[in-house]
Every structure is written in C-alpha cells, then in structure tokens.
Image (cartoon, grey):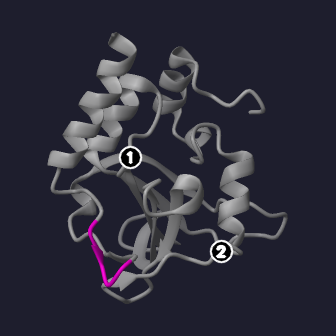
Amino acid sequence: MKAIWLPCMAALALAASTDAPRFTNGNQLAKPTNYREWVWVSSGVGMSYSSEASGGGFDNVFVTPAGYRGFVQTGRWPEGTMFVIEEREALNKGSINKAGHYQGALHGLVAEVKDASRFANGWAFFNFGNADSAAPLPKTEPCYACHAQHGAVDNTFVQFYPTLLEIARQKGTVKAAY
C-alpha cells in the first residue's frame, strides 16, 4: 500500500501546484516567472560536458516544489516536474572582491519537463532565450542522449545535487550503470 500511496500523493501535490508547467499553442512551454521561488538544488561553475573548455559561467538549478517533495518521498521525479537552469556569467573583479567568483548577468534560461503524456521518452528540453515561451528542442539535440545515458536518476543529473543523490541512494533509485 505504501509503495502506491506515496507516488499518488506526490502527483496530487503537483497537480495542485501553481508551479506546474503551463503550455500554450500545443507544446509551447510558458516561461515560469517565479522559478527563483522554487527549490534550489545546486549551482555549478565552469561545468562542461565535453572536453572543450567552458565559458566558466554559473548554472543555478531550480525545481518545482511539488517535484522536489515527490522526489524526497520516493526517489523519483513525479509527472509534471520542471527544472529551470539559470545560466549566469561568472565575475571575479568588482566592488571589494579580491578572490573567487560571483554571479553576474543572466545569459540564458533552459528548462526540462517530465510529462509522459506529452513527450516521447517522458522528458523534453526547452531553451527560452529572450522569449516568454519555447517549443521543445528537437530530439536530435545532444541533451536528450546525454541525459538518458548519464543521468543518475530518471533522466536527470542528480549526481550533481549532493543532498538528492543521497536520497536516491537511500531509496535505491540510482541507475545501476551510474
């Protein structure tokens, strides 16, 4: 009973959430305006998934509160979970700063949404640029294959979210290949 109850509760919480993905014109995802009020799961600086050097910016990852709660309960992301990755420049000279880096201007905003009823393989990626909505990126974009192959849990890079990785290990949801 408990195995069925927890995912159902997570799905109900997500359905009641005002942070759930909103789609317009078919599969156009409306850019969430309040994502900075969501749960922050991690930040990286200068990360690159290829051997080429990265621009050195910050990536701040936020997830919908209901998605986060569902993951904490089950170790899996419930339907309707949405991540937003905020890409910001990394600065090192300014004001009184003498060492290290801090975040500067916003350079990009991308999202990943879990919705098996809408997208093949259950997940889709969106790049907003300067727009208020975005269509799903084509399945030929490298993010799809990379996330499927390297995501530690359910198409996501939980391996870069230390608190959630520990939860996934406890729940037994980390991919065996990881």
* View extreme (right): residue: 51
* Segment colored magenta: 22-26
Left or right: residue 70 versus residue 138 is left
Q: Nearer the viewer, residue 118 or 166?
A: 118
Residue at 57% across, 61% down: 120
**Residue 67, located in which quarter of the rendered image?**
top left
Looking at the image, which residue is at 48% across and 70% down? 87
Residue 167 on the magenta segment: no
For discs 2 and 1, the disc positioned in front in the rendered view: 1
Q: Amino acid at mark 2?
A: Gly
In the rendered image, residue 50, in percent from the top left (x then y), is placed at: 80, 64
Q: Decide: few, some or many residues near mark 1? Use Cα within 10 Å; few <14, some 14-19, many ≥20.
A: many
When the figure is inspected, residue 2 is found, relative to residue 154, above or below; the finding is above
Q: Which mark is residue 16?
A: none
Q: Marks 1 and 2: in contact by CB < 8 Å? A: no
Q: From this viewpoint, is residue 101 visible?
A: no
Q: Is residue 95 visible?
A: yes
Residue occupying image coordinates x 63% and y 68%: 56
For the N terminus, give its image quadrant: top left
Main SS of the magenta part reads loop
52 relative to 168 in the view: left or right: right
Nearer to the camera, 44 or 76: 76
> Label 1 amino acid?
Glu
Q: Tell me residue 27's x, y (percent).
A: 40, 76
Q: Quadrant of residue 71?
A: top left
Q: Which residue is mark 2?
A: 55
Secondary structure beneath label 2: loop
Q: Which residue is mark 1?
A: 79
Q: x%, y% of residue 43?
A: 48, 52
x, y percentage for residue 61?
44, 55
Above or below residue 119? Residue 68 is above
Give me the residue at 22% from left, 57% from top.
19
